[in-house]
Amino acid sequence: MSVFYLKYKPHYRDNLKLAIPVVISQLGHTLVQTSDTIIVGHFAGTISLAAVALATSIFTIPLIIGIGISYGSTPLIAQHNGRGEFAECGQLLSNSLFINAITGVILFGLVCLGSIYLLDDLHQSQQVLIKAKPFLMLLALSVIPMLIFNTFKQFAEGLGFTKQAMLISIWGNILNICLGITFVKGLFGIHPMGIMGAGYSTLIDRCVMSIVMGVYVFKSKNFRKYLKDFSVRNVNRVRSLSILKIGAPVALQYAFEISAFSAAAILMGTIGVLPQAAHQIAINLASMTYMMSSGVSAAAAIKSGNYFGAKDHGGLRLSANASYHIVLIFMAFTALIFTFGNNLLPWIYTSDKAVIGIAAQLLILAAIFQLFDGAQVVGLGILRGMGDVNIPTVITFLAYWVVGLPIGYYWGIHLNWGPSGIWYGLVLGLMVSAVLLYIRFKIISKHQRFRQSIIIAKD
């Protein structure tokens, strides 16, 4: 064990140094929804909590698509930085900002159309729909500043500067909580807004965060050598396509997974309001650990991109394995928390005992899929850093939409196993994704070792 630890120790240290701030800033995306859920659950009631569940489950799909597209620039920036091509990094930022701003506007428009024409056909409670629609519109509007923030965040993180985004995320969430309680409950003379107050607080928070992150990037001396060629004139087809060739498949990868969980929330709504509210609690807690693992994944993508750009395939394999070790240990720890705290954690969100009872059952299943969830998202990050995004996209589609969700529907609805049956299918989908992505990494790693040995032999 000591030999094993010494072998990976430098990579544990480097990966954690990069990952911890990314984990905290990634967690910020989920904590916004978490604080909205907690505030609404305690101050606005179970119907409003179910409305948050419905709106959030739908909004999460465009949110994660936007985040995925914004990730397209990070591996490229890391690779160019590894080669010492600093000016190219600033030009990539120009193109990324353009792409993400356009993406935000398009996603906002799609959510607006969906809320008008599709929500009424999902067989949800009318009481829930009345509250969910306007809340969803505010969430959709907030995706534009959120993607602008993410543009600057991914640029800084691709260059190894991760702490500032972390600090902005922390303060942003504090702002969101303070505004959320004030607006929802109605403090300081403000009329109680209910669920809409949570929507306004999220929108304001994301606007402030995007402005502060942009000011940091343009004013910091750390980025001066990279921003010499930052200009709207450097937005061109070649660079934009290079970002989209990575970002679009990454967006699909995340969309396939998150949309499966969103579809599960809609299936829960067909069973009843209580299962839907309980699902929101369980999935919200699982989303926090997922976003933490996603932070490790983002760090793994950056390190993989650095090693891949420098053609250090031996270092890439060691760094990738170290990322797997880190995430598996972390997710095993969170699985224990979910297992032993399954009856206590739901009280954070609501005092409705019927909802808490269902959520406690779902948290046991959430504990089971923690390891698979962490392994699959890190696998995606490692492969993304190496520029391998197309096959992983197919894997995620198969895992969630061919295996996980259909089986969850069959067990939960057709066999009448209820909420647990739907979640059994989700667990199975995560397991399939984790295993296939790890096999994909091993195949590519073996191929790279073979090519490197041939090059060395020729020299």
Image (cartoon, rainbow, N blue to C red):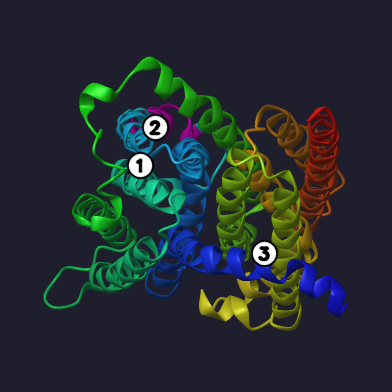
Residue 278 in view: no
Q: Is residue 129 above or below residue 338?
A: above
Closer mark to the observer between disc 3 and disc 1: 3
Give the percent coordinates (x, y) of residue 134: 32, 46
Disc 1: which residue: 140
The amino acid pointed to by label 3 is His
Q: Is residue 53 above or below residue 232?
A: below
Q: Secondary structure at mark 3?
A: helix
Q: CA distance from mark 3 to mark 1?
A: 39 Å
Disc 3: which residue: 11
Disc 2: which residue: 107
Question: Which residue reaches farthest front?
Answer: 459
Q: Are marks 2 and 3 in contact (CB under 8 Å)?
A: no
Mark nearer the N terminus (3 vs 1): 3
Q: Is residue 173 within the magenta segment?
A: no
Name the residue at 76% across, 57% down. Answer: 321
